[in-house]
Image: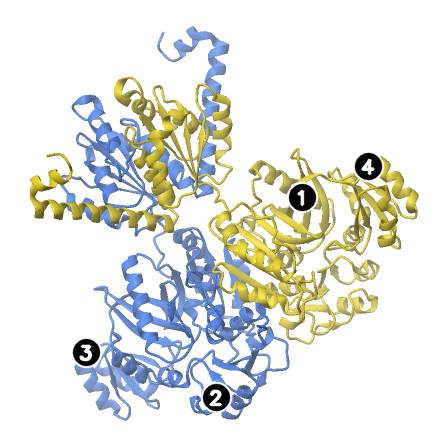
Chain colours: A blue, B yellow
Amino acid sequence: MADSRKVGVLGGGQLGRMLIEAANRLNIQVNVLDAAASPAKQISAHDGHIEGSFKDASSVKKLAQACDVVTVEIEHVDTHMLEEVAGEVAVEPSWKTLRTIKDKYAQKEYLKEHGVDVAESEDLEGKGADGLKAVGERFGYPYMLKSKTEAYDGRGNFVVRSEANIDAAIKALGDRPLYAERWAEFRMELAVMVVKTKDGVLTFPTVETVHEDSICKLTYAPPRNVSKETTQRAQDLAKKAIGAFEGKGVFGVEMFLLKDDTLLVNEIAPRPHNSGHYTIEACPLSQYDAHLRAILDMPIPASALRLREPAIMLNILGGKTPDSHLKVAHKAYESPNASIHLYGKGDARPGRKMGHITVTAPTLSEAEKEIQPLIDFVDDQRGKPLGPRAAQVDEPLVAVIMGSDSDLPVLKAGLQILEKLQIPFTTRITSAHRTPDWLREFSKSAADTSLRVIIGAAGGAAHLPGMCASWTTLPVVGLPVKVTHMDGWDSLVSMTQMPRGEPVATVGINNSTNAALLAVRILGATDLAVRERLRVWMEGNEKEVLRKDQELAEQGFESYLKKMGKW
Amino acid sequence: MADSRKVGVLGGGQLGRMLIEAANRLNIQVNVLDAAASPAKQISAHDGHIEGSFKDASSVKKLAQACDVVTVEIEHVDTHMLEEVAGEVAVEPSWKTLRTIKDKYAQKEYLKEHGVDVAESEDLEGKGADGLKAVGERFGYPYMLKSKTEAYDGRGNFVVRSEANIDAAIKALGDRPLYAERWAEFRMELAVMVVKTKDGVLTFPTVETVHEDSICKLTYAPPRNVSKETTQRAQDLAKKAIGAFEGKGVFGVEMFLLKDDTLLVNEIAPRPHNSGHYTIEACPLSQYDAHLRAILDMPIPASALRLREPAIMLNILGGKTPDSHLKVAHKAYESPNASIHLYGKGDARPGRKMGHITVTAPTLSEAEKEIQPLIDFVDDQRGKPLGPRAAQVDEPLVAVIMGSDSDLPVLKAGLQILEKLQIPFTTRITSAHRTPDWLREFSKSAADTSLRVIIGAAGGAAHLPGMCASWTTLPVVGLPVKVTHMDGWDSLVSMTQMPRGEPVATVGINNSTNAALLAVRILGATDLAVRERLRVWMEGNEKEVLRKDQELAEQGFESYLKKMGKW
C-alpha cells in the first residue's frame, strides 16, 4: 500500500523536473541521473540522485541498482545498458522501444510495418552526394534530409531545396547517419499525448503545435479550425502508433495534417513532451502525473485526461540577453491567466528552452487575446520580427442566419444589441428552400464550431429556424418576420408549432431586439461576465423608465405630450 | 529584473512546502528555517536553508542575514527577534501584525478597535475559577474558553457547557493565559483569503469551511446555499479586517455566518491558510503565488484571484494506522478530478494533517458527488462513524414554474424528458396574479442559485414567464397552456409579444416536450456532456422514424393502418 517504490530517471532537464513536481505531491522518490544541480535535482532534496551522464553505462547501472523502475526524459540514452539491467529492474518504456525510436529512420520503418501512415523516407547512410541527388529525382525538391540519431529541436535536420543545395547539406550533416523524407505540404501540425498502461492505451486531447526554426513555439488546445472528426482521427492514429510499441508511460506523437485532411505521423517521443506541457493546468491529470502512474501501474481514470478549459502554451526560448527569460516572466506577471514555469537553467542561450507559459481561458479566443502580447514580447526578446498576427477577431458565439437579405433591416436592432453587449457573432444568408443543402451543411457543422446559439430570422412559411434545429443540437432562436400577408402570424406559428422533439425558441414578430437578448441570456446562463453586462444593461433601461415617470409626474401630461410633439 | 532576491521562511511544514512549490516555478530561492528534512526542505535542494527552530532567536537572526525578505508559515514565532532584524531585512507581514495576531485576545481587541465585528470576549488571565464563573453568568452557557497563545487546530480551546464544567476547563487549560468568548450560534463557517500588497487589499472568493473536532475538514468554493450578497459581504468584512494590519502577504480570515445572516470574524491567520489550499487548482493564481508576489512587490492582477471551477478541498488527517494517508491517496487515484497533495511527513498520527485532496468540477454538486466516497473513506480511516450524508440530490439547473397545479398534467411529458436526459430540476407553483410577491422573490434570486434556465408554464393571460423574465437575467422558456377559451392563442401571444428588452423563448401550445428540450439545448450550449446526451436521444428518434418508414414501405398502408387500429 505505502508507495515506497523508487523511480529512476535518465536525464534531469525540464521534463525530469516537471515529473518530479508531480512525484513530490505523491511523496514518490525519484532518483535523477544527470549533472549536479540539474533542473530536476533542484527541486528534490535527497541522497538518492546519481551524478553523471545518462549516456554513461556505469552510471545507468548505478541508478538501476537504486530503483524499482527506470524511465527516461530523453531517448538519446545508452539502450544497451538498459537492456542489460532490464533483468534486475523494470525499464519503462522498454529498451527495445527506446532503441527503435531513438533512430528516426528505424522508427519510421517500424511504424510503416505496423500499418501507421508516415511520410515516405529513404535510407541514405553511406550513399553520399549521389544518394542525395537520386532522392531529389525521386521525391522532387524540396525534401528533408535528417540525421537518424541525436536529432531534436531542429538540430540534425536540413531542407534540401534544389540539387544546387546538396553540397551545403553534406557540409552540414555529412558526418552523421542520414535518411531523406518526402516533403509534407501540411496545413498544420497536430500532436497527441498517448498514455500506455498495463491495461491499454489512452489519449489526451489533440493539440495544434506551431514550430519556428524547427523548435516548438506554441501549442493550442484544442487546435484552431479543425473539426472534431479530424481531432478524433488524430487520437486514433496516435493510439495505433503507440499500440505498436512495447512498454508503459506517456508518448508524444507529432503529426502532419495535410491540405487534403490526411494525417501522417511525423515523429514519436517515448516520454513526456513539450506539446503536453499544457496538461499541467488544462487537464485534471497532467502528462507527468500520467507518466508516473503508468510506469508504476497506478490507476488512471480515462476522464482525467479531458480538457478542462482551452489552453495555449508558449515556450520561453532564450533570447539576445542572458536574462531574456526573466524579462518574459516579468511581463507575464501582469497576465491574469498565465501560469509561469521557469526551468532553473541559469543564463539563457539563444533558442534554449528556458521555461514556458500556459494561458487557460473559457474560450480559445480569449486565451489567444491574452497571450498575444506575450508572443510579441518573446519574439522581440529573440530579435525576431513580429510574427503574422492572428486576425484579432473573436470567434463567433452567435450565428444570425436569415432566409433572405430582405430580413436584414429587421435584424438591425438585434445586431446592434449584440454589439453593445460585446457578443461576437456572424451573419449568414441561408434559405431553407433556395439553399437547402447549404442550410443543412451549416446546421450540421454548427455544434463543432465556436457557436453556442443560432438566431434564425424568416418570414412566410419560415422553415429556416425549424430546419436548422432539426440538424443541430444547439439552441435555435426563431425570429418571425412580417412579410406581405397575414401580419407575421404565418411565421410566428410556423416557429412555435414545431413538432415534439425539435424546439424553436420563438420571440415576437419583428422583435429582433428580443431575439438578440434571448441569445445573450442563453450565453449568460453559464458565462457570468455576459450575465453581468446584461444586468447592467437592464438596470439602465429601468432607470430610463423611472426617469420618464418622474418627468411625467412633475410636468403633467400636457407638457409631456407637447415635448413629445403629440399635443 | 533578474529576481535574485532570496525569501526566508520561518517554518517548513506543509504551508512552507506549497509556498516553495510556487517559488520553484519562478526560480525564486526560498531559505527555510526548520528541522532538517522538514516537508518544505524536501522539495528545495540548495545550501541556503537553516537548521533549527523557528522559535529560536539566533536561528531567526541567521536566516535574516541570508535573505532579502523574511516571512512566516506560522505565527507562533519569536516576534521580538523579528522586530530586531526588521531594520536589516524586510519582514512581511510586519512583526507588529504577527505579535498582535499570535495573541488571540489581543487580535480580537485590535479588530474591535478597528470597527470589525467579532464575537464578544473577556480577558480571564489570572482570574481563576471565579472569573470563569462570572463570565458564565454574563455570557450564559455554553461559552468558549480559549488560550490566548499557541492555540490552533482545536488545541487550546475548551467548551464550557455549564458551571459544573469549570473544574474540567481549568484542569485542561489552567496553566495557559486564558480568555472567554461568547458562544456563536452559527449557520456555517466562511473563510476568505485576503492579499495585502504594497498597493492595496485584494480578496480570493469566499469559501465555506467545515470543521470537525475543531480541525478544518472540508472547504467548499463557493459556499453551499449562500447568496452572492452574503459572500460579497464576507469579502468586504475580510478586507476591512486585514486593512487594519500592517504588512504584506496573504491572510486567512475565518468567519461565522450567524443564523440571522450576521457575519463575525472568528480568527485571522497572517499567512497562507488551510482554507486557501483549493486555490492551487481552482484559481489562476494560488494563495502561495499570491503570497510570494505580495511580499516581493510583484504584480497581482485582481482577476487572477477568480474561481475557475467550483472546488471542494478535503484534508487527509492521520487515521488509525501510520499509512492511513497513503490509503486515502490510493483511493483518490480512482477519482478523475481529484488532485492529491501529500506533505512528506512520514508516518501518520491521528488527527495530523498529512495531505489534502482537491476535487474541481463544472458544478459544485458534481464535485460533491465525486468527493463523497473520499470523505467516507477518510472518516473510516479515522475510525469515525460515517458523517451525515449531504442529501445526494443534485442542485437543480432548471426550474419549472407554473401558475397553477392544473398546468402540471401538461408539463408531465416535459418533466419526463428532463429526467431521461438527466437534468436536475425543481418544480414550483407561483402565480403572477395570486402570488406576485413570491414570483418576484423567486425570480429575483434565481440567478444567485444553481439555476441556469427557467421554464414558465401558464394559460390565459399567461403573465408568468414574462414577469419572471423581467426580474431575472436567466433565459426563460415560455410554455403556453391551452385553457378554456381561444385554444391557447391567448397564452401564446402573451408570451411571444413581450416588449423589447425582456424576451420569453416561446414554444408550441401545450408542447412541454419542446419546452424541456429547449432547456436542454440551452444547457448543452456550454455543457458538452448534456449536448452529447441530447444528440444520442435525437439519433434514437431518427432511427425510430426510419424504422417506421421501412415498415410502411414493406407492409403497405393497409396493413400498417390495421396495426395502428385505424382501419
Disc on the earlier residue, 3 or 2: 2
Nearer to us: label 2 or label 4: 4
Position above or below: A489 against B453: above
Locate the C terminus of chain B and report the quarter of the image it occupies: top left
Residue A318 in view of the camera: no
In the rendered view, tell whether residue B543 sits above or below residue B413.
below
Q: Quadrant of residue B556?
A: top left
Q: Nearer the viewer, mark 3 or mark 4?
A: 4
Which residue was labeled with disc 1? B238
Chain at numbered mark 2? A
Q: Is residue B250 visible?
A: yes
Kindly indicate whether the residue at mark 2 contacts the one at mark 3 (C-beta within 8 angstroms). no
Q: Mark 3 sits on what residue? A: A140
Q: Which label sits on residue B139?
A: 4
Residue under the image location 32 percent in, 25 percent down: B481
User: What type is the residue that disc 4 sits on?
Assistant: Phe
Callout 2 touching callout 1 (CB < 8 Å): no
User: Which chain does the numbered disc 1 sit on?
Assistant: B
Q: Which residue is mark 2?
A: A55
Q: Position of residue B483 (x, y in %)?
A: 31, 21
